[in-house]
Image: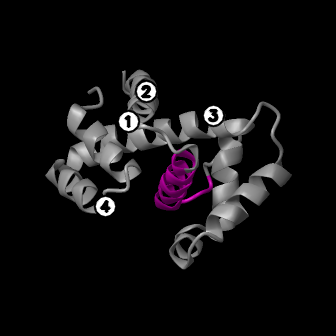
Amino acid sequence: MPVTDEQVASLRAQLSRQPEEHLRLFNLLDHESKKTGYQALVSAAFVVAVQRRFASGAGMEEVMEFVGGVRSRSSLAADQLDPVIAERVIMSVLADDSLDDVDARQSFQAQLVLMAAIVGDEDLDDAGLDAFLAQARKLADKWLG
């Protein structure tokens, strides 16, 4: 089942810093849609964001610095983001490391927070955000295919 326009709209609202609209759209998604398409879209968006943010060959020191910076932005970010898990999910993209021993919920939460931070740092306009989401959707559809 490919990613739906509704799933993309929900993530777009979140990345556009429209939390009420994000929750409204997210709550319209059925349970199965949240478990499959939406999670695949967020994970794909995370991969795209990490690949855009970190140069090829980025190492653990750069990742640790970035995670520390994200956690220092607010007490909410510090509470939501376990630094060890955050570093590992980024390194899983950069170095193809396994996350088999990481709780899926914690991994997803870290991906969501980190991806939102990376996209926020890019300060994308509407066209840039649409292009980012289109790239993420294409990758998610490939995974779901």
> Nearer the observer, disc 3 or disc 1?
1
**Along the viewing direction, whichever of 101 and 15 lies nearer the viewer:** 15
- Look at mark 1 in the image and give the residue it sits on: 126
CB under 8 Å between discs 1 and 4: no
Q: For the residue marked with disc 2, what is the amino acid?
A: Ala
- Look at mark 4 in the image and give the residue it sits on: 19
Distance from Cα at disc 3 to Cα at disc 1: 18 Å
Distance from Cα at disc 2 to Cα at disc 4: 21 Å
- Identify the residue at image location x=37%, y=24%: 141
Q: Where 41 falls versus 66 (above or below)?
A: above
Distance from Cα at disc 2 to Cα at disc 3: 13 Å
- Identify the residue at image location x=63%, y=62%: 70
Residue range of the region highlighted in magenta in the rendering: 101-120
- Of the two numbered discs 2 and 1 on the same chain, state the one appearing first in sequence: 1
Where residue 131 sits in the image (x, y, percent)? 43, 27
- Look at mark 2 in the image and give the residue it sits on: 131
Q: For the residue marked with disc 1, what is the amino acid?
A: Asp
CB under 8 Å between discs 2 and 4: no
- Of the two numbered discs 2 and 4 on the same chain, state the one appearing first in sequence: 4
- Look at mark 3 in the image and give the residue it sits on: 52
